[in-house]
Structures are given as C-alpha cells and as structure tokens.
Amino acid sequence: MTSVAKSAPRHQRFGYRINAVGVAGALVVGFWIVVALAAPAIVPHPIGDIVDTDYFGPISRELWLGSDYLGRDMTSRILMGARYTLGISIASVIIAGVSGVMLGMIAAITGGVVDMVLSRFLDALNSIPSKLFSLVVVAAVGSSIPVLIVTMAVIYIPGAFRFARALAVNINTMDFVVVARIRGESLFYLIRAEILPNIIGPVLVDLGLRFVFIVLLLSGLSFLGLGVKPPYADWGALVRENIGGLPYAAPAVIVPSLAIASLTIAVNLLIDNLPTKIRDRENS
Amino acid sequence: MTSLVEIRELRVEATTDSGRTIAIIKGVDLDIAEGEIVALIGESGSGKTTIAMTLMGYARAGCRIVGGTVAVDGVDMVALSEKDRAAVRGAKIAYVPQSAAAAFNPAIRIMDQVIEVVRIHGVMPLEEARAKAVALFRALSLPNPEMIGDRYPHQVSGGQLQRLAAAMALIANPKLLIFDEPTTALDVTTQVEVLRAFKSVISAHRIAGIYVSHDLAVVAQIADRIVVLRNGEVQESGATRDILARAQHPYTQQLLAAVTPHHAPRPAVSGPTAAEALLEVHEVSVGYGPLRSDGQPAIVAVENVSLRVARGRNLGIIGESGCGKSTLARAIAGILPPFAGGVVFDGRELGRSARGRSADQLRQLQIVFQHADTALNPAQTVEDILGRPLTFYHGMARKPRSARIDQLLDMVKLPRSLRLRRPAELSGGQKQRVNFARALAADPKLIVCDEITSALDTVVAAAIIDLLKELQRELDLAYVFISHDLSVVEAICDDIVVMYRGRKIEQISPEAMARPEHPYTQLLLSSVPKLDPTWLDNLRQDPEQVRAYCQR
Amino acid sequence: MKHRIVSLVLARLAIALVTAIIVSFAVFFATAMLPGDTATILLGQAATPEAVEGLRKAMHLDDPAIFRFLRWLAGVVHGDLGVSYANNMPVAKLISGRLVNTLKLAGLTAVISVPLALTLGITAAMLRNTLYDRCLTIAIIGVVSVPEFMIATLAVLLFAVYLNWLPAVSFTSEIRTVYDFARAYAMPVVTLTVVISAQMIRMSRAAVVETLNTPYVEMALLKGASRGRLVFHHALPNALGPIVNAVALSLSYLLGGVIIVETVFNYPGIAKLMVDAVSTRDLPLIQSCAIIFCFGYLFLTTTADIIAILSNPRLR
C-alpha cells in the first residue's frame, strides 16, 4: 500500500492520506457517476435502434461492446443502464439513510417507550428477507421505478436505524451529552451538534455498504424480471435480456455483469480504504 | 556480582497511524540483581510498561524493539526466536497485569488458568501444581483457598483477582516477576492487603522483580531501588531511601512535591456569611433500575444523605469505589433524580431532575466530570465547546463571546492559540482545563467536581488543584469536591464527608483527619500509603475493622 | 445464575413470537394491497357482476382486513394454507414437495459450506496479514460485491461452456445414481456455497480477530502459550457466540440466495414456485411461501441469539 499523498507538510497539523487502492475505487465510482449524469449526451446510438444485422455480435470497431439479442448497441445500453442502476440505488439509499439515521438518533436520545416501539417494529421488519419482501411488494403493486425506490428504501431503513441507533446510544452515554442535556438543550440541538457529528463517519461508511446491497438487490430483481421493466433497462435487466447469449459467452451478457461488479467492488474498496486523517501533533 | 537482568542501550520505536515512527524508549540501561525489586516510576507515556515488557522480549502491537540488548540470566531476549521466547515466558519470567479482571479469560475456570503455565511448560505434574496453587492462594490470604480455583473470573472480586494473578505468575517458580501497576485499579483499603501479600511472597521466594507504578508511596513500600523515567529516558536511579530523602533530579523533586500533603488551613470565615447555606441536601436517596412495589428502585446507591455547602466554601466527599459518591453528585446536578429527599439551592427547592429546573438554576450549578476525554465533544473545537454555554445562558453575540473565550482560556491558564484545536489534540491536563473552563463559562456559584484529578498524572493533578484554589479566591465559587484520593480532598476542602455503602458516616474537618471517630474513617485514612518505606511494615489495622468494612 | 439464563432465553423467545406476528401481519397486508379485485381476476373480465358478488361473499373479501387476517392466521396455524388461485390446488399440497427440494439444496449447501467457511475464517484470523489472509480477503470482497446471478452465470460459463462437464441449465428429475445426483446439484450447490461462505468467512474471521486482541490472550501469550493454544484454547471459546451468530446469519442469507439460484438453474424448489406465483399473482401461494421464508429466517436468527446467550461464560 503506497501512500499517494504523503504526510502533510510540517507546518500543517492536519492532512489526509489515502492509499492507491482507495484512489482506484474512488476513480471507478466517480467514472460511473459521470456516465450516469452524461449518458444521454454521450451514447453513440439511440438505445432502441437496431444497428447490427447480427445478434449477440462480438466486440468490434463500430460496436465497442458488441450487440445484444436484437442487434442493438450494447455500449449505448450500458451507458444508459448506469442511469437506472445508479439513480434508483442512490435515491433508495438516501431515503433509507436519512430516515433510518434520524429515527435511530431519536430513539437513542429519547429512550423509553419510543425507543422500544421503534426498535421492536423495525427489527420485525428486518426479519423479512430482503428479496422476499421485494417479491411480495412487486407481486402486490407491480414494479414501477418509484415503487422500486420506495421498496428498497423500506427494506434498508431497519438496518440503517439499527446501526445509527447503536452508535448514538454509545455517544448518548458520553459525559458531554449529559453536560448538554443538563444545560437544558433541545432534542434538535442534541442531534445536530452532539450526536450526529460524532457518528457521521461510520454512518456514511455503513450507507456505502447499504448502497452496494441495494445495487445487488436491484440487479437481482431485474434479473428475475421483477425489477426495471422494458423499455427501460438497468444492468440487471440487460443480463436477463441477453442471458441467451451465455452459451456463446457473448459480450452482451458478460459486460453488464462486469459493470455491476466494477461498481460494487469499487465502492467496497473505497470504503475499506477511506482517506485517514493524520492526527499526530508535530511536537510529540 | 553479575546482575540477573542487564538492559543496555534499549531503544523501542512506535509507528503512529500516519506511518511516522517515533522513539518511545531512547537508550535505557537498567540492572536488576538476584532477589532485588526495582521500581520504574513515571507518568503515563514515560515508557515504563514498555521497558518492563521487553524483559519478555515482547513489544505491544505497533511497537518494535529496534536496538540494544535485554539480557535475562545471560540470554538476550531481543535476539531469541519467538519459539525460544515462549519457552522462557511464564516459566522463568512471569507477568502480573494491571487489570487482572481483563487478563483472566472469562470462559475458563480460575484454577485452569493459574496452572496453565505448568501445563504449557511441563515443569511439574499437574496434581503438584494444583496443590501449590492452593498453597499460594493461602499465602496470598485469599478466602476459601481450596475452592476459589473452581470459580470463573467474573465470580470473584477485583482485589481477589489481582492476588490470583500473582499466584498465576508464581506457580512455576519464576526467577523474575514483572508487576505492571498491579494495585492501581484497587481501593486503598484493598491495596494494603494486596501489597502485604505481594511483599510476603516476594521475600519468601527471594524473587527478583520489576515494579511498574506511578505511585511513589506504593513503590516506597516494596522496592529496593527506584528508577525515575520520563519520555523514554532514565532521569535518576538509586536506592529507595536515597531517592525519597535526597532526590537530585528536578523532575523527581517535582514528583515528590506533588504527593507530599500541603494543606494550608483556610481562614475560617466568621460572621453571617459562614452560616449562609448555598446548597443543602436533605435526606436524599438515589437508586437505579425499575421501581419495586414499595416505591424504591431495585438498586439503592445513596441512602438518606444530608449535607450542606456554605457560600464560597468547599465540601469534600470521599469514599471507595461503589460508595455512592458519584451517584450523589449526579443527583445534585439533576442527572439522576433522587427517589426521596430534596435539594435546596440558594434558598430555593430544586427540581429533582434537570428538566424541572430553571435555566438560571442550571447555570448556577455546574458539574465537571472525571474523564475529560468523554466530557468534551470530540467533534467540536475548544472555541465551540466554550462558546456554547455563553450563547445558551448569556445570549452573547459573536464579538463579546470571542473576547470571553479568551478570558476563560486565560483564567484556566491555557494559551489562546488552543482555541481552534479539538480535544484529541490536547494533553490530558489541557483537556481537564477546558472541561473546567466550560463550567466557568456559565458563571456558576457552585461547581460539583467529580473525581476531576483522578485520571491525571500526579504533577498535572497538583497544578489543577492549585488552579481551582486560585479561581475560588477570584470568583467566590463554592466546590463540592468528590474524590477517592484523600490527599487531594485534604488539600482543598473546608469540610469532608465520608461515605460508605451509600451512607454518610462521618463529617470531619481536614484538621481532624488525624483523629477520626468512625472506625471506617480510621481504616480508610490509615490505608493511604505514605512515602515512608517502613509504613506498611509498621501499619497495624484492627482485623475486626478490616473484616467489617473491606469488600475484598 | 441458572434462572437468569432461563429468563433471558424466554425473553428472546417472546420477542421471536411478537416478531412472527408482526411479520405475518406485514406479509398479509402487503399482498392484500394487490390492486384490482381478486374476484374479477379469478373469474375474468367477462364474468357477470352477480357471479363476482357471489365469489366475493364466498371468499369473505368484503370483511374488514383484520378479520380476514385473523381467519387466514388461524388457517396457517392449522396447516390450512388456502387454495391456489392459479390451479385450484390446495397450497399445502403444492408447497410440500417443493419445500423438500429446497431443504435438500439448502441442507447440502450448509453441510459443505459451514465447515469450509469456518476453517477458512479461523485460519485467516490466525494468519492475520499474511499473503493467505490478504488473498482470501480480496476474494471475499469480490464475491460479496457481485450479485448471486453473476456467480451462477460464471459457474455455467466455467462448467458448462468452457469445461463442458455439466449441462448448462437443466434439472433432471430422474436421479438414479450418485453421478446423476452430483450432476444435478453441482452447480446450484457450488453457487450457493460460494455466496454464503464469503459472508461466513468474513464474520468468523472478524470474531476471532477481535478475541485475539483481548488482554487475556496477551496474558496467555506472556505465559508462553503457542499460537495454536492461543486460538483454540483462549480465543475460540469466547468467539463461539459471534461465530454461531455468523453461521446462522449466513444460513438465513441462503433463503435469499435460493431465490436466484433456483430460478437460474430451473430448480423445482419453493423459491422458484414463489417467483412463478408472483408472475401469475397467485395470492395464497405467495403468502404461504413468504411466511415459510420469514419463519425460517426467524428460526435461524432466534437460534443464533439463544446460542449466544448459552455460550456466554459470564452467565454461567
């Protein structure tokens, strides 16, 4: 592990250090975010157009990633697929994170009955396997994109809640929170100034992991045909559409799989190798 | 005569989390003769435990022995292979840890852990080892020596575990013992018993040892020689009596000065002000846990305690761990509402919990906690920490607030340049000053100080006490000073309340500390170690009292 | 001490019971949200309003939801899971054979993966920061980062396309020899094993590493104990609770894994049945499958917690 940015110059007491693996992870994640934002502007072909006479075409000069089961351009479909995979997952993780973490902090600070009811209910929700829960919801209300976002957010709220609550309970027992409490501070102040700043680091890491789970769940659902529905297609749906190309090892089935793996592995590597703050004092 | 231990030019380095290496032991020489006990004295971070560990060829995670030799009985522990070191550890050199409670494996019975060294090294038959262990338990005056080995560690008390750890170290007849602050975690009355037990087994087995401690008075009882360390370097070393009587090095003199009692009686305030009570606690009872049918909580920690603090005066509360002194402090501050009794502050009855008190009442009664590490929000700067009470209580705008923060820092003698630092970038003493300055920011009339010097090194703690006295003169503050350290309370308080098992058993003045009336106070005060090396040998305590009051 | 353990275990069982009720409630109402009128769906668009009305009555569809829930719950308790909308067969009958198939698959996976994963996890903790440990860690990040269907796809590519050992996507019901059995189960079991072992290795390694960092393990090291003794005598007994927890959690992860694996390999298990039921919107069937999954999951997590309570030496 080599350090990219060596320790900060001597006059500066703080610095950040990140290793090469972390940088690589960050670059891949950044790349996909840019792709998702810019996809409509950079796709070489409209995604619905059949541009290849052959189906499951190989990688070529014109079609960088080959063609799919109808002879459409895979490059364009992957680039547009990034929009759905990333967009839906990020929306879900934000909803799950914000509500789960808020509830977790409130439960930890107020304690008592509020805490018990919230914990019991969300733990029960947590004991429904995630795939199963989404299957049931999809069976009930179909799988439009808003439904997918809300469903996956609901699935991951209990986890975010439990994680944030555990951290907040620890912080809440600290003397500085007791001091603030007997100063007469409000619940809102306690959350904003005393609890949140001290749990935000681990919470963000946890949300990163949850993002990975959401991407995997979404891809799994789409793969089963229960996630993103045509004419839209996320990466999981692209694998499903082109699964017929598997016996020929067609790029149309391999490339979307690789796209998913590259995103999730990159997020995992980034989380495991986050920049570390240099906390040394220079005079010690 | 060659020494049993010869440490030459020992150097140890540690790697910080930014990958920088720092020298923590900078070329230390040390000798221990056969049958000699050498004490390593120094404040936290002085490297005393690190040096002791190198005797077993061991350096904790993140540390590395980078130079020098550590010869034990002619064998250099640094140069040995890990396998050869393992053969020496436990058999020839044994270790008595600081916290026996953590060093015993919770899943294994005590006897199996005590004789594990024998099992590993095969030095004697297991039956013989068991018999020897029971003999050691008896020699260390452990209760029920035949049966105690059958228990699990969580089933015996801390003082007992500490002695069991000593038995564990002695089982294979080691030549050299390493004591790593073995009594620091114990109460004074328990410490007396443990020290006695250590002393008698050491002389019975003629064991050589290294005794790591920050407490000169404890070391005076047990060591033949004292080595004073600071920042990984030896400052001074010599025979115990010489060091205590004729310390040469300024740092040693400073250490000695910090533990020597220096109580200057405060002039008794006469006239009407002396009678004017600021805080009155009336028959307060506090507890934890769910309420039982009779309205009492499951665990009652404080029972029927009354006390009174006059304006501008100091009240000390002393007692051993679990006596309820911190719980009482929390009840006074409104953190833990009492289930019976009441608190009157400045002539008005206070709400039982902080929620029932007015902002002004909360402002005038502040509490300062023991551990500045957890009492300061690690995410905030010193400026934020001190600024919040100013905004909250006094509604100060940015400019006057900033000026007041500077003032506060001056008052607690911290440089203004620390304003933008976070707690993690401050030393222990600096943190405790910020902690105290935050209470001052409220402009209180009374500050409850809960063991505020206990986590600090002696020299730093003495400076904090001086600061408190000075501020009191300037600001007309009253303190409730809670501590287990009698010398601290003696130094600052006008009146002292002694607590035992949740009850107030006596109230005395510092002058009367020499002749307390209650037998528990007598026991407690006589158990505080003195710098005199003959103190422990001459100490006579009534065995009846010891049995009655010690939870050993 | 004894009655403290008993009361802790009873408390845990009570929580499990409450959870079971909340979960059945949630499952019932999630499926009851189904848009469109069940009776109309069953009878088709051409049905007369009278026929629809009659069916509604017969199915108690007009009752308040809470009554329907209680009636359904009572049925579940008695083993009456209702009748499938799709083919009018009793749900219990549809499920039973499929459940056995899924249990076979899950059992086989558990028997292979638990010893494998624990061995790898514990050895990785023992050999912390060695090349072996690093390689294993990287492999695990790789596996937990990719969807299960991708591992299944890779298995097909490897065994069926490149090596040509096994048929790509098929499940033969005719199993006569061990060879047939191995051919049929190889790919689903390998896929599931890889997926859940990764979780289990990660968690058991973390549990052992944590106990290896405790002062009592350091103490044992300073007594001269060997590496093996440190791990097996001092660390493992204390890591048992977390490890069992890891195993149970990973096995519960199996429940999610089989949904994908049964679909990919066309394996006639209960998960495949459920996915098919979702596409035909066969309400009673979905409810029953979901409840079975939830209870399986609940059973595993509750067992894990109870074992953790029983293995805590401080409660002895």
Image (cartoon, rainbow, N blue to C red):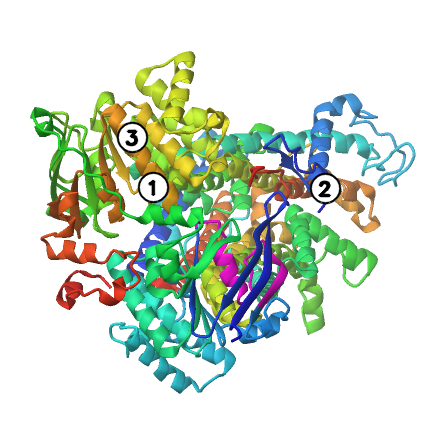
> Where does the image place residue B27, in percent across and percent down from the top left?
59, 56
Please report the residue visible at 35 percent of the width from the left and 70 percent of the height from the top.
B164
Q: Are marks 2 and 3 on the same chain?
A: no
Q: Measured along the vertical axis of the image, is residue B217 above or below residue B86?
A: above
Residue B363 as seen in the image, left or right of residue A251: left
Please report the residue visible at 53 percent of the width from the left and 52 percent of the height from the top.
B232
Which kind of residue does numbered mark 3 sit on? Glu
Please report the residue visible at 22 percent of the width from the left and 66 percent of the height from the top.
B538
Q: Secondary structure at mark 2?
A: helix
Q: Secondary structure at mark 3?
A: helix
Q: What label does residue B462 carry, if any?
A: 1
Q: Is residue B49 magenta?
A: yes
Residue B515 as seen in the image, left or right of residue B326: left
Q: Measured along the vertical axis of the image, is residue C91 above or below residue C244?
A: above
Residue that carries the numbered disc 3 in the rendered image: B470
Q: CA gap, disc 2 to disc 3?
A: 54 Å
Q: Chain of mark 1?
A: B
Label 3 Cα neighbours within 10 Å, binned few <14 / some 14-19 / many ≥20: few
Residue that carries the numbered disc 2 in the rendered image: A20
Residue A198 as seen in the image, left or right of residue A261: left
Label 2 Cα neighbours within 10 Å, binned few <14 / some 14-19 / many ≥20: some
Residue B406 falls in image quadrant: top left
Q: What label does residue B153 carry, if any?
A: none
For the C terminus of chain A, the image quarter is top right
Q: Chain of mark 2?
A: A
State which region is magenta. Answer: B43-70
Which kind of residue does numbered mark 1 sit on? Ala
Q: Are marks 2 and 1 on the same chain?
A: no
Q: CA gap, disc 2 to disc 1?
A: 48 Å
